[in-house]
Image (tube, rainbow, N blue to C red):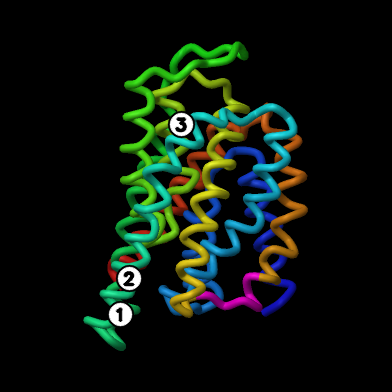
Amino acid sequence: MTWELSLTGLLIGVLVGMTGMGGGSLMTPVLVLVFDFNVVLAVGTDILHGAIFKTIGAWRHRMLGHVHARLTFWLALGSVPASLAGVYVIELLKDHFGEDINDVASRILGVALVLGGIGFFVRIFVHKRAASNRPYLLTDRDRVYAVVIGLVGGFILGLTSVGSGTFFGLMLLLLFPLTAPKVVGTDLFHAAVLLWAAGLAHLSANNVDLAATGWLALGSIPGILIGSQFTVRLPERTIRVVLATVLLLAGIRLALG
C-alpha cells in the first residue's frame, strides 16, 4: 500500500488543482472503501494530507494572482474554530460509542458525501454572478456571509473531511463576483489554512496515519502543481456529473453500511 496511495494522490491532486473540488470528498471514501481504513483514521489522515498538498496549490495560485486574501481571512475567521469543534465532537463520539464509533462515523460520512454529491450537481448548473478581473471590495454583508459560511463548512470538515472544495467553492460561486480562477484559488488558499488547523487537531488526537499521509503527498503535490496550470480550462460538465455520481454512490454505500 505505497505506490497505490501515491497514484491516488496524483490523480486527486490534478483534479483539485484544476477545479478546487474533490479532495476530501473523494479521498476519504477511497481510503475507507478501497484501502480499508478505519473511518476516523481516514478522516484525520485525509485532512492532514490535504493541508500539505493544498498549501502547495494555494502558494501556486497566490503567485498566479488567483487569491482574494481578504475574503480568505473572513472565511477562516469562522471556519478554523468551527473545524476544531468538529474534531472535538469526533472525540466525544469515540468516548461515547467506543468500538462502535466506526459504524457511527461511516453513517455520518455517508450523509456528508451524499450532500457533497448534491452540491457537485448544483455547481454544474449554477449560474454565477457576473465577474471581472477588477479588484472586488468586500461589503459588510459579504463579511457576514463569509463568517457564517466558514462556521458551517468548517464544522462539517472537522467532523467528516468533506466540504473544503465542494461546499466552500459552491458558496463562492453563488455569493461573490469572482472569476473562475479566483474561485479556485481563493477556495484552495482558504482550504490550506483550514485544513492545517483541523489536521493538527486530528494529529494530536491520534487520528492520523503519518506513513499513508507521506505516500499520498508524494503523488498529490506534483498533481496539484500540474492541475493548477489548467485552472482556466475547467472540466467539462460530463466530468462533474461523473464525480457527483461517485460521491452519491459512495455516500449511500457508507450510510447504509
Q: Is residue 224 left or right of residue 160?
A: right
- Residue positioned 56% across, 31% down in the render: 69
Q: Position of residue 165 (x, y in %)?
A: 49, 44
Identified by mark 1, the residue type is Lys
Q: How many marks?
A: 3
The answer to the question of whether label 1 and label 2 lie on touching residues, with beta carbons closer than 8 A, is yes
- Disc marking residue 90: 2
Q: Position of residue 128 (x, y in %)?
A: 44, 20
Q: Quadrant of residue 45?
A: bottom right
Q: Is residue 117 visible?
A: no
- Disc marking residue 84: none
Question: Reading the chain from its start, which is encountered first: label 3 or label 2?
Answer: 2
The answer to the question of whether label 1 and label 3 lie on touching residues, with beta carbons closer than 8 A, is no
Vertical relation: 46 (above or below) 194? below
Q: Nearer the viewer, residue 253 or 126?
A: 126
Q: Position of residue 218 (x, y in %)?
A: 74, 64
Mark 2 nearby-residue class (10 Å; few <14, some 14–19, many ≥20): many
Identified by mark 3, the residue type is Ile
- The residue segment tinted magenta is 208-213
- Residue positioned 45% across, 27% down in the render: 173
User: Which element type, helix, strand or loop, lies under badge 1?
Assistant: helix
User: Which element type, helix, strand or loop, lies under badge 3?
Assistant: helix
Q: Is residue 158 left or right of residue 178?
A: left
Q: CA distance from mark 1 to mark 3?
A: 37 Å
Q: Residue furthest left?
A: 96
Q: Position of residue 30 (x, y in %)?
A: 53, 66
- Residue positioned 51% across, 64% down in the render: 199
The residue singled out by tag 1 in the image is: 94
Mark 1 nearby-residue class (10 Å; few <14, some 14–19, many ≥20): some
